[in-house]
């Protein structure tokens, strides 16, 4: 029968985590067993002790390792407990624990493998004031992730998510920061059915200040390398091929302009230097095209390795 594990990453959340754990419904339609797991990511305020006092199993990191590592620790703990469905939610009180039943409903019914809470989709309700950097960041990331994954999303940065144990076996996070986006792209790449569930969410923490970066430039600089890497790995042929095509078209345009001038005047002066630019651009396009083909081959091999790892993990689970 279905077992649900609710996992909460926590870093110095002693003031809020008890109330969040207590509010988790004791009975959820379609679920027979409920387990609470807290990953204490190097807290110094007694978060682990509070979590245990409120009935949670605690996985403790000796130091703060980041949300990506905490996510993997939480997923592994849930799988070790025999979870069929896993819910990931923050411990700061922004999400309503009572909404877990609504979030997991599409999975319990067999309509989805992954359910994402959306704060901006039709039917959602966001209370309070959300910093402009978070709105801008989500708007930008939604468009990038949607285009890359081939599915339209309205919210790709929300930490309130549910997924099957099978989906969890596909995940192998390499980033300490943008694990939410990396895991979403991984699920889409492996054909997992992803749906969005509109819910009511607080825009601000219940207690204290958000640790999210409040500067757009700083947020972009931190997120960009991870996202570019994810897009590169997800569809390298398009990633490198588009740059190669741009270089080729630009080179042909420059070279064509010089050629037309030569036909009219019989000489290349004063555009002789543009011939070098056109030739160099063409060579660059050829090299990038070769890189695109090689990267696509590597991506296909990586996909096969991920499938082998998934099958091995699934076999170990029985």
Image (spheres, rainbow, N blue to C red):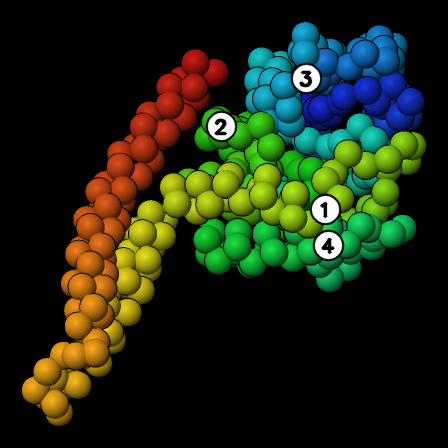
- Which sits earlier in the primary sequence, circle 2 or circle 3? 3
Q: Are marks 2 and 3 in contact (CB under 8 Å)?
A: no
Residue at mark 3: 64
- Which sits earlier in the primary sequence, circle 3 or circle 1? 3
Pick whichever, 263 or 6, lies toward us. Answer: 263
Q: Are marks 3 and 1 in contact (CB under 8 Å)?
A: no
Could you say which disc has been placed on residue 135 in the image?
4
- Which sits earlier in the primary sequence, circle 2 or circle 1? 2
Could you say which disc has been placed on residue 215 in the image?
1
**In the figure, is residue 77 to the left or right of 133?**
left
- Which sits earlier in the primary sequence, circle 4 or circle 1? 4
Q: Residues within 10 Å of mark 1 (few under 14, many from 20)?
A: few
Element under disc 2: loop
- Which sits earlier in the primary sequence, circle 4 or circle 3? 3
Q: Residues within 10 Å of mark 2 (few under 14, many from 20)?
A: some
Real-space CA distance between mark 4 and mark 3, rounded to the nearest whole angstrom: 27 Å
Residue at mark 2: 174
Pick whichever, 166 or 184, lies toward us. Answer: 184
């Amino acid at each position: 029968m279905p077992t649900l594990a609710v996992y909460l990453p926590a870093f110095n959340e002693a003031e809020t985590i008890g109330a969040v754990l207590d509010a988790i419904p004791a009975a959820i339609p379609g679920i027979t067993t409920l387990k609470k797991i807290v990953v204490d990511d190097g807290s110094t305020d007694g978060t682990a002790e509070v979590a245990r006092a409120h009935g949670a199993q605690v996985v403790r990191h000796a130091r703060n390792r980041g949300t990506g590592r905490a996510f993997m620790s939480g997923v592994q703990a849930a799988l070790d407990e025999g979870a069929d469905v896993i819910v990931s939610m923050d411990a700061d009180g922004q999400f309503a624990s009572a909404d877990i039943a609504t979030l997991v409903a599409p999975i319990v019914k067999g309509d989805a493998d992954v359910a994402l809470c959306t704060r901006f989709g039709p039917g959602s309700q966001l209370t309070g004031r959300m910093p402009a950097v978070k709105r801008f960041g989500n708007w930008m990331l939604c468009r990038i992730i949607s285009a890359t994954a081939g599915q339209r999303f309205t919210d790709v940065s929300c930490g309130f998510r549910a997924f099957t144990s099978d989906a969890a076996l596909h995940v192998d996070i390499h980033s300490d920061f943008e694990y939410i986006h990396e895991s979403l792209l991984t699920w889409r790449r492996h054909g997992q059915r992803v749906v969005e569930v509109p819910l009511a969410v607080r825009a601000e923490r219940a207690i204290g200040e958000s640790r999210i970066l409040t500067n757009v430039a700083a947020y972009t600089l931190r997120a960009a390398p991870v996202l570019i890497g994810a897009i590169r790995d997800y569809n390298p042929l398009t990633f490198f091929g588009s740059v190669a095509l741009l270089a080729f078209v630009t080179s042909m345009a420059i070279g064509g302009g010089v050629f037309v001038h030569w036909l009219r005047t019989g000489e290349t002066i004063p555009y002789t230097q543009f011939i070098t630019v056109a030739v160099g651009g063409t060579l660059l396009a050829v090299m990038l095209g070769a890189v695109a083909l090689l990267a696509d081959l590597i991506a296909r091999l990586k996909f096969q390795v991920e499938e082998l790892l998934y099958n091995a993990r699934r076999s170990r689970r029985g």
